[in-house]
Amino acid sequence: MIIRMVLTPFQQQLRDRILAAEVIPPPAPWRQVGRGIVPVGGLLGIGFAVHPDTGHDLVLTVSSSGHGLFDAVTGEKLEREYDPEEDPDGPDLSCPGLGPVADLRIPVAGLWGGGLHSGTDDGWSVDVPAPEWPHHRVLLVGGTAPERGGQHGETWWHVFHSSWSTFRTAGFSPTGRTLAVATSSDLTLWTRH
């Protein structure tokens, strides 16, 4: 038995609008970190911390082959733990940090649940529709969202399409200076440091 959802005309128009939007870079002040996609095989989730010396956002990756810590401004891998003592645990799904943030527990979002910030204090937000599930699209919104009539490339930007790997999570760092997208195979970062 096949069950088909019937979309309202508004829902169909919104779906068509998102499907037609090409992936484009976000506007200034956002810029992609490094060469774009950072390969992280078996990625399960990510979390954020702030480097105590540089003030840069840091991204903790949790994968089937260990934990890694990346500088979210440069894309540089700072630390790697191949055999971590624990994976995300507890009500906040946190795990121990690495390197300069080894004394912290970092909340992680991804396969186990949890969530990243969906907006910033100065008005940026992220939306993750899946009009062709399981292929998610990540929209950066800096004005009027598509469902409210905003224009692609002016008030919202289709910045990522997870068509090759399973989507895990997307969102902002607590500082609002980094936008991250995690899939089962990679990490993509944008910064405005």
Image (spheres, helix red, strand yellow):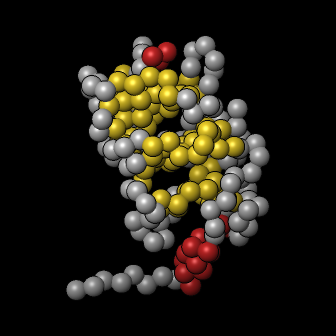
Q: Position of residue 117 (x, y in %)?
A: 54, 41
Quadrant of the drawing holding the C terminus = top right
Q: Relative to 149, is 180 above or below?
A: above
Q: Is residue 108 left or right of residue 74?
A: left
Q: Is residue 157 left or right of residue 92?
A: right
**Residue 149 image-quadrant placement:** bottom right
Q: Relative to 107, is 36 above or below?
A: below
Q: Relative to 111, is 60 above or below?
A: above
Front in this rendered view, residue 191 or 186: 186
Q: Is residue 18 left or right of residue 77?
A: right
Q: Is residue 191 visible?
A: yes
Q: Is residue 118 left or right of residue 193?
A: left
Q: Position of residue 174 (x, y in %)?
A: 57, 33
Return the residue found at the far left.
Answer: 1
Q: Relative to 176, is 53 above or below?
A: above
Q: Is residue 114 visible?
A: no
Residue positioned 68% across, 54% down in the render = 25
Q: Position of residue 129 (x, y in %)?
A: 51, 63
**Residue 110 image-quadrant placement:** top left
**Residue 9 image-quadrant placement:** bottom right
Front in this rendered view, residue 98 or 9: 98
Front in this rendered view, residue 176 or 57: 57
Quadrant of the drawing holding the N terminus = bottom left
Residue positioned 29% across, 39% down in the render = 64
Residue positioned 73% across, 56% down in the render = 143
Q: Position of residue 47 (x, y in %)?
A: 45, 34
Q: How many marks?
A: 0
